[in-house]
Image (cartoon, rainbow, N blue to C red):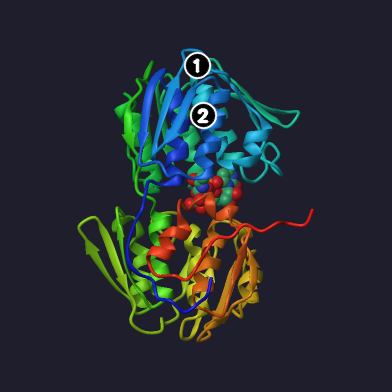
Amino acid sequence: MRGGARLAGEVSVTGAKNSALKLMAAALLAPGHCTLTAVPEIADVAIMAELLRRLRCAATVADGTVELDVPDRIESEADYDLVRRLRASICVLGPLLARCGEARVALPGGDNIGSRGLDMHIGGLERLGAVITSEHGFLVATAGRLTGTTIWLEFPSVGATENLLTAAVLAKGTTVIDNAAREPEIGDLVAMLNSMGAQVNGAGSSTLVIDGVDALSPVAHQTVPDRVVAGTWAIGAAITRGDVTVRNAVPGHLEIALDKLVSAGATVETTVDGFRVCMQQRPRSVDVVTLPYPGFPTDLQPAIIALAAVSDGAAMVTENIFEGRFMFIDELVRLGADVRTDGHHAVVRGRPRLSGAPVRATDIRAGAALVLAGLVADGVTDVAEVHHIDRGYAGFVPQLQALGADVERIEVDVCP
Ligand code: UD1
């Protein structure tokens, strides 16, 4: 991309990746035909569809709709090849255990049983009566019918809340999940489960109460809009001093992020189906702390650091959710950003402009943030390994072009 253009115009957001993947897994809970709409056309959805096929479901993905046929008898093993490509595939654990009474899910690379990363999933399922071991790189879970109980999560983990929820809906008796995650994607999953016939109360609060039922029915369900993609466009408008109307977005799901943009000097208006962000002048630096919802989302932390890199003043950005989330900063520094990190704090001293350079996307959100940074860098910025961005943003480059960015996607031969 060649920096300098301001983003202006309208962009429409589709359903949330982080919801769609879990809704697809939850479809396993009921035999029959399930339809999910507003599903983003991204690589992760294709991988999850393949995983469901290997569990004997029929799955098609076309035009933002996923059609699933879930048979009466499903396989209970998710192999390493797919789990390695999609860490979120761990979300089939709860539904498989509830449906089959057993599950074998490959451990995502680097994780060991009980290690940081899956301990709350495992501990919670054990509280529901599952016996879980680690064998030959697989997490092996067995149970008769799970039995409701009270589970207190040490941290409001999104993935653990989802796995426990999808396991508990078919358990015998009542399950209470305390300190549950409150993300809108959890609300979306609860909405789908309840329309399948589950009895879940408390979505959006820290306590979920689940009265187990004997069986669920398949449904048609529309995925909640992607707040991270919407937030990326909002920050894209702010960083380029642009004017972007984001359609099919829920401003209430981004309250703190949008408030931060207002503090940075942007005007934010709610529109009939989303919001509009307009920035007339150089943004002011604002401090940001990532926290579980409704706090500032960790998934927007790389983009807000890119914004701080060109803002007036210094900002302290604190990352509280993922330890490794500052890894992309080395790439941002290649573009001339002045960022120092100390543990989970980053101090960003804003510069008037960045300077185009070749950089490499290290994950989905870092990739999007580097693109935003490239839009305000002098000269040309090449962002390599954009397959990471494909995992979370459908049609990112054409959408950027439609908003006026000077950007193109090119295939390059990589030396063996
Ligand atoms: C989900 C999202 C991710 C988002 C994150 C937080 C998907 C596919 N991904 O990830 O984009 O950034 O929520 O909003 O939906 N942890 C443990 N033990 C556990 C579970 C989690 O220590 O058993 C730790 C994790 O290592 C991490 C933190 O808790 O440091 C947050 O994890 P969690 O909320 O579970 O995030 P994910 O569901 O993995």
- Residue 229 is at least partly visible in this image: yes
Q: Residue at x 41, y 82 (%)?
A: 284
Q: Nearer the viewer, mark 1 or mark 2?
A: 2
Q: CA distance from mark 1 to mark 2?
A: 12 Å
Q: Residues within 10 Å of mark 2 (few under 14, many from 20)?
A: many
Label drawn at residue 94: 2
Above or below 323: residue 101: above
- Which residue extends farthest right? 416
Q: Secondary structure at mark 1?
A: loop
Dot placed on the residue nearer the N-terminal end, 1 or 2: 2
Residue in front for this viewpoint, 399 or 76: 399
Q: Secondary structure at mark 2?
A: helix
- Which residue extends farthest top? 72
**Label 2 near ligand 1 (CB < 8 Å):** no
Label drawn at residue 288: none
Q: Residues within 10 Å of mark 1 (few under 14, many from 20)?
A: many
Q: Residue at x 33, y 62 (%)?
A: 255
Q: Position of residue 362 (x, y in %)?
A: 63, 59
Q: Position of residue 53 (x, y in %)?
A: 54, 25
Q: Position of residue 218 (x, y in %)?
A: 36, 22
Q: Position of residue 141 (x, y in %)?
A: 61, 24
Q: Which residue is mark 1?
A: 145
Left or right for 62, reference 334? left
Quarter of the figure with residue 241: bottom left
Tell me if label 1 and label 2 are in contact, CB under 8 Å: no
Amino acid type for the residue under numbered disc 2: Gly
Residue in front for this viewpoint, 409 or 263: 409
Left or right for 142, reference 230? right
Amino acid type for the residue under numbered disc 1: Arg
